[in-house]
Image: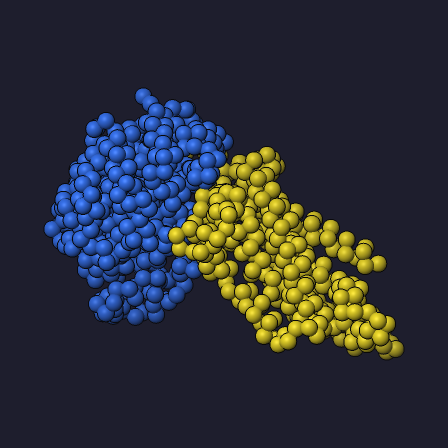
Chain colours: A blue, B yellow
Amino acid sequence: MPNSSVTGGNARRSPVGRPLSSRRTFLRTSGALGAGALAGGTLSGCTVFQGDSEGTTVRIWSWLTGMDKYVAAFNASQRSIHVELSVIAAGLSGGYAQQTNAIKAHNAPDILHVEYQGLPQVLLTGGLRDLTPDLADLSDGYSPAAWQGVRPDGRTWAVPMDLAPMVFFYRKDLFDKHGIRVPRTWEQFRDAAEQVRQADRAARITTFPLNDGSFFAGMAWQSGDPWWRIDGDTWRVGVDDAGTLRTAEYWQSLIDSRLIRTGGTGTQNWIAAMHQGGLWGLLGASWSVGMLKKSIPEDDGRWAVTTMPTWDGEPANGMQGGTAFAVSDESEVSEAALTFLRWLSTDPEVARIGATFTLPFPGYLPSRKTARGEFRNDYFLGDPVYDVLDEAAERVPDWTWGPNALGLFSTVKDAFGSVPAGGTDLPSAIREVQSSSVSDMRRRGLSVEEGSRR
Amino acid sequence: MSSLAPARSAESEAAAGSPRPRGSTRKSGRSRRNAAAMLLTGPFVLLLLGTVLVPIGYTVWLSLFTERLSGLGFDGPRQVFVDVGNYQTVLSDPAFLEGVGNVALYAALHIPVMLGGALVLALLLDSAVVRMAKVWSLAVFLPYAVPGVIAGLIWAYLYSPDVGPISSMLPFDPLGSNGVLTSIVNMATWQWLGYNMIIFYTALQTVPRELLEAARADGAGPLRTALSIKVPMIRPTAFVALVFTLIGSLQLFTEPMVLRNFTGSVTSSWTPSLYVYESAFVSNDYGRAAAASVLLAVASALLSAFVMRLSTRRSR
């Protein structure tokens, strides 16, 4: 993986003795001219102006879409802190590797990009700052799922940004035309899948991307048996607990009866199928709104969104992704970093900016209200998007991500690799993942017990 | 290595000596030569140290340690010396051994097809049979100019069922678990065929024309000339190409890495290089990654040495 996006701290140094205010003016102008210029560290390498009246430089690495715009707005809004963004590759495409390597090499940026699912694994580096006292006052403002996501062991390790509850997108125009009812349970979903195939032999209700471990985790999350649980000083691992096995068996039966596709989402193949009516639905999350609008922009007025089908009518759905930001333990400007992160996480301005280019779904509830007011829906039919997402966010059951979650996604992908060809099935693959996960965690010295059920 | 040459020639010149008597002039001349030698070899030595020896040393050092966690692990890791523990883990890891098996199968298919094809094409170009040799050689060479990742993506799209035409023409799925090896061999062969053909073709140009004329005068046809004269004459070049291809096969990474985004048939440890990547950057197990890298390097070195020895023995 190329590391070209790390500009490090060597691009330009501000000339000694030059008044900083002129740089600020320059910044503001450049921010107005085009926020994009700030990305990629054009101004990186300023020496750390710590604590004095001149202002402080805070370095952040992130792959969040639109982060350049947020940073530009923050830098323009005040003089005491200057945030310097380096855009890095998305998490599993190299972002986590780059960040954990930097922590190991003792040159991590002040702020790191972690997702809820990646936080415990990054924590194993021992390189993050415990933010428990710093954020205690914000606890009531966040959606419980977000707040729990940054507190795996009861200490606060990161500042939540957004939430990604899972929902079901479907072709409302085609469902209506063929009289297919929107499925509320997974049994109804199977019927709907059959009806879709009857209506158009080449079409399927959705794809179940076997190459995406975090997607499968999100689907298993709904079933109520978390893959990990913290019990005192021990990890309880239950990847193959009853709920997940039930999920695996259900989807295996849909694969066997050829009611769904199994290819990845977001690929050229998938975009073609979505656009040409080969796929009538998408099991997605809040960020899928942006993905749909970007991948198939001409398809406005066709799609609607609803909550995930449920097991036995019990309202629940998982999450897939969701961003938070952590502070490096070695940061010398943690105060300033936290000032920026509090602004990023809770200021309504951020939601307003976000609504101009995506559907922001902040973890901080007051900001979500702002986002809802600002978002202009010109794409979806049916229920208002925010109503559905709000309901989905309420339905998220307890879940803890484990210290090997990112590695496990890759194990899941490997184990599912031969499913389409009939080499194995989802339940056996999941049992295999459980045993390799447990032995891997033990080998690393962690305290582990099998089974996460209480 | 060439940058060592001036130093050695300066030395040997001094050692061979001129009839001048031992004296201060000679001594100062020698120390000046030594200084010059150091100046000239300095950049090479520094680069060798900084980019080869130190990183290798660090890798070996890393491979002897592991990061041990305790409890939940949130207090960070401790570095623990494990001796050859990481090597044992790697060598007994079925995922690694499977990767080695994949690479062996790949090499068994790719090397004969690609080098054989390159040799045949080079002989055809070199014979009088082919017109517009320059155009042909450029056409076959062009794929080498395409960056590996781009070539990988292009092929991956060609293999994809709904986007590319290939899967509907083949009796098997080129991205399925049974077809993916041949797909990767095909990608690599497409990329490297022209490159090796140029190497062979250049070597063929150096075969003395008198020799070929003599053969023709003795009544050897073009085929006989190719097999009995040209091929034996370029054997050393062929062995060098073989060594490079062998090392390249062991280190197979780009093609499977790209295909991983298109199919689940390529696992995260499908080749030893992918195994190293996965250990270091997905599982954060640097000790295991370092041990696997060292094993891979040692295997490459042993194999190359073996092939080179084979080449000198056979040419004798």
Residue A8 or residue B117, whichever sits in front? B117
From the viewer's perspective, is residue A204 above or below residue A19?
above
Label tally:
0
In the image, farthest residue toward the left: A373
Across and down, in percent, residue A133 comes to 25, 38
Position of residue A223 relative to residue B157, above or below, is above
Left/right placement of residue A447 relative to residue B209 reads left
Q: Is residue A183 above or below residue A447?
A: below
Closest to the observer, B272 or B154: B154
Relative depth, front residue between A64 and A288: A288
Residue name at image x 37 percent, y 46 percent: A264
Q: Residue at x 46, y 51 (%)?
A: B167
Q: Residue furthest top?
A: A454
Residue found 38% across the figure and 24% down from its top: A451
Q: Horizontal and vertical percent for residue A54?
A: 26, 61
Judged left or right of residue A86, residue B296 is right
Picture residue at 40% right of the left edge, 58% below the top: A6
Q: Quadrant of residue A165?
A: top left
Can you tell which quarter of the image residue A183 is in?
top left
Residue B178, visible in the rendered structure: yes
Could you tell whether A384 is left or right of A207 in the image?
A: left
The x and y percentages for residue B305 are 72, 52
